[in-house]
Every structure is written in structure tokens, then in C-alpha cells.
Amino acid sequence: MIDVIIAGGGPAGLMLAGELRLAGVRTVVLEKESEPSGQARALGLHARSIEVLDQRGLLERFLALGQRFAVGGFFAGIDKPWPERLDTGHAYVLGIPQSITERLLAERAVELGAEIRRGCEVVGLSQDEDGVTVELASGGTPADEGVAGEGGTRLRSRYLVGCDGGRSTVRKLLGVGFPGEPTRVETLLGEVGVAVPPETLASVVTEVRKTHAWFGAMPLGDGVYRLIVPAEGLADNRADPPTLEELKRRVRALAGTDFGAHSPRWLSRFGDATRLAERYRVGRVLLAGDAAHIHPPTGGMGLNLGIQDAFNLGWKLAAEVGGWAPEGLLDSYHAERHPVAAAVLDNTRAQTELLSSEPGARSVRRLVAELMDFEEVNRYLIEKISAIGVRYDFGVGHELLGRRLRDVGLKRGRLYELTRGGRGLLLDQTGRLSAAGWTDRVDHVVDVSEELNVPAVLLRPDGHVAWVGEDQRDLLGQLPKWFGAAVS
């Protein structure tokens, strides 16, 4: 039997596949599209996602194909300098198209032994106390795994994770509610060639953005730009992409010119709907990424949120499959990530309001822009967007408890170099502690750091601090909470 089936081969699904395979979990990704779309709806990775890649030894691959930016404008497009003293070793945004992110994550998952099966669409599911039966619209699976049925092929797995996007089939089949607000404002998006000089285009865009903050044009090289422009209204079927003429017509209406737009690579439309799944888990089926939450792309948090969902879920689901998960560990995925997504939805709602062309919203935008001149305010907002300010509720304790620990220098290297295996980590600066009984799940490293002013920390596989202290008995009370029973 397959251990975990992942429905959806986007960033969240591929990140999760890599995390599961790192723990030896047999993982199959089912992607309904027969080939990668090549579309790059998202263009960047924020600091916490960059840290995640560093923790798993993947960052160099991404840096080689991306570009670092330490520029402002990520909160509601308000142009303020990049804040100083961010609590991260990666105080930048990595510009990299989603298509490349997906390719690199897929390569990593396959290297670790995950199977990615394209042209496999999930159309049905059922579950019992032993596993999940997944029905596909068509075959394409080995005969010893699939059972032919009237609707196609059925696969059996111990768990299923729906990473199949905002219109998630898995979520709908589960009957999980998806409350929130529907789309009120629609935006057109396209990557097109232009026939005007860059300085002309930049000048026009600067002028239009004084009254229409949603309007924009981003150079992609070779005369190609990503144009973004508010739509005239809501399309009857928002799943249908706009035509080139529709995009040009809206650009002309706001800018007085369509920049000679031509030769579209792709065209799309998106709305400002915000919705959050009521539950992230129903029995042996879980949701992650856009299947669990949707929101406008303001601030560029969507893809990052999905990757971070997968990073939180992967080790917990692997522990459940491996048989050592303590009671409640898998349920902590919802408990931790649902509030994070709710905060992101609130953040994007606020940013969307500040992007409105209405006089009241523009007045509030000017006020927020003034507040962002205070370094503390600027830094606070960027920490929310970059997710380095996330703290899970682990109860009362040290200020580091529940937070991810930034990369710190050690006497013999870097902290994140010790997290590549996806295991727990006891970083012991006292040399007096022990994790005996958990050595199959937790690495005990005795080393010191001038940047870490605590005796010892226990890190979960996702890098969040589970314990701080120097008392062995206190440590022994926390190890079972996150890593199950000791092995004698």
C-alpha cells in the first residue's frame, strides 16, 4: 500500500512530497495536468520560505536561478525602504518564477524517491479506519496498485493530502466548509511583449499608480512585461482567461495607451476572494496550500504559505506513518497552521483595502505610509509578510518557545546545516544533557554559539523551538510531547 497520496503537484504538494520522502514515507503525487503549465503566477520567495530551503540544503539551487531583492513596497505596494535588523540570516526576497520553484521542488522530491504521476485526476475518495481509497478519472497506474472500476482506477493509501488548489476536489469531496468572502474586484494579469521603450512605460505606470495602485508592469527581460490591471467587472466564468484584446482595452482605459502589447505568453484573471477551510483534517485526509486557504496575491504570500504548510505537516504525517507520533501531533497541524492562514487572510484584506482607488481608502493609505516611516512599524509589517514573526502557541515559557530559530553560527559550522535530515535537534551548549531513547528521531549536538544566549534548545524538525533550558528532567518531560515514547 502507498503510505501517502498527495493530490496536486504544485509547490505545496511537491514540498510535502520531499519532506515525506526524507523520512522514508512511500509517497505518490497525483497531478491532473499532463505537463507543467509554465505559468509563473508567483514570482518570489519570502524570508521564511528561504530559511526552509536552507534548512533542507536546497537554497543554493534556488539562489543559482533567482535574484535577491532587498527593496520595499511589499506591504500594499507602499514604497518604503527595506527594514533594518530583520531577525533572519536571509533578509531579502528571492525573485524566482513559480515554474522554476516547482521544477526544483519536483527534482528534489524525485531524487528522494517520490513518484510524480501526471495526467491523474482525483474524482472520488472514501476512507475507513485503515486507509483511503482514491478514485482517478483515468488509469496510468501499475496494475498491482490500482483496481479498475467503472470510473477509472482506484488507489489505496494510508493517508491522502489535498494540495489541489483553491477549487480543490479533495476539499469538496470531504464536504469541508470554505467560508469567507467572494470576489468583489477582479484583476487581469498577463505576460506580454510591449512596443514602447522601458522609460516610457515606466513613466506612464508611475503616473497611473498615483490613483490606481493595482496597476503595474514588471519587466521580465527581452521586452516582455507582466501587466496587471483592474478588470472592468466580474467575468461570467472566471476560470476562462481573458483575451489579449480584453487586457489591452483595460490598459488603454487607465493609461491612455496599451503599450503595443503583443505575443502573450499567458493570460489570467484573479479575484480578491478570501476563504479559509473550516478544518485541515478529516480522518486520514488533510488539506494544505490553496486547498485550505485562498486570498488575493497582495504581498506575495500565497505560494509561501503553502510551502510553509507542507513544512509543518510533513514531519508530523511521517511520524504518524512511522508509528512514533505522540497523541495529538497530527492534529497540531490544524491547530498551528489554521491561525497562521487566518492572519494572512486578514493581512491581505487590509492590503487590498489600501489599494482601493476610493478617497477614504487613499486617505488611510497615506496615513499608513506615514506610520511606516517608523522603523519598528515597517519591520513589523514585513515580518508578518515574510512569516518570520510566526509563533505557535506552545504555552507559557521562554520568549523563543514556539518560534522558529534563525540560523546562527556555531563553533563548528551553522545551525541550519544540522537540520538537513529533517529530524529533531537538541542543541546543547552545556554538554550535560542527553536525548538517549530518542536517538532515532533527535540529533544531540554539543556546540556553542555566540548568537544564542540560552543553555540549550530543542528544535522540532521544522525548526520551531519546543524547549529551552538546562534541566535534564525538564527536557525529559518535553521530548515525549513532540517525539513520542523513548526506545529503550
Image (cartoon, rainbow, N blue to C red):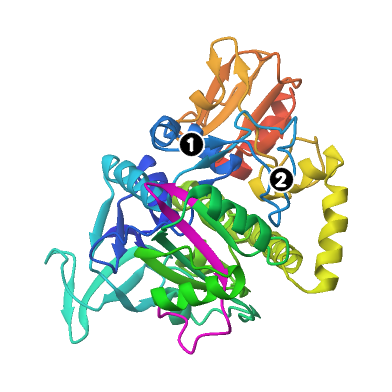
- Front position in the image: 110 or 371: 371
Label 2's element? helix
Magenta-drawn segment? 219-241
Find residue 132 and report its horizontal and vertical position in percent: 36, 70
Question: Hey, which quadrant is residue 469 in on the image?
Answer: top right
**Residue 456, image x and y in percent?**
69, 23
Task: Answer few, some or many: residues within 10 Å of disc 2's Cα (few below 14, many 20 plus, some between 14 and 19).
Answer: many
Q: Which residue lies under the disc numbered 1?
A: 67
The residue drawn where x is 61% and y is 80% is 183
Question: Magenta stretch: residue 417 in it?
Answer: no
Residue ranking furthest to the top: 411
In the image, residue 310 above or below residue 250: above
427 or 346: nearer the viewer? 346
- Which quadrant of the figure has residue 273? bottom right
Q: Quadrant of residue 302?
A: bottom right
Looking at the image, residue 201 lies above or below residue 54: below
- Position of residue 212 in the picture relative to residue 58 (left or right): right
- The secondary structure type at the circle numbered 1 is strand
Q: Is residue 220 magenta?
A: yes
Is the residue under label 1 in contact with that under label 2 (CB below 8 Å)? no
Q: Mark 2 or 1 closer to N-term?
A: 1
Residue at 68% across, 31% down: 475
The residue under label 2 is 382
Q: Residues within 10 Å of mark 1 (few under 14, many from 20)?
A: few
Q: Amino acid at mark 2?
A: Ile
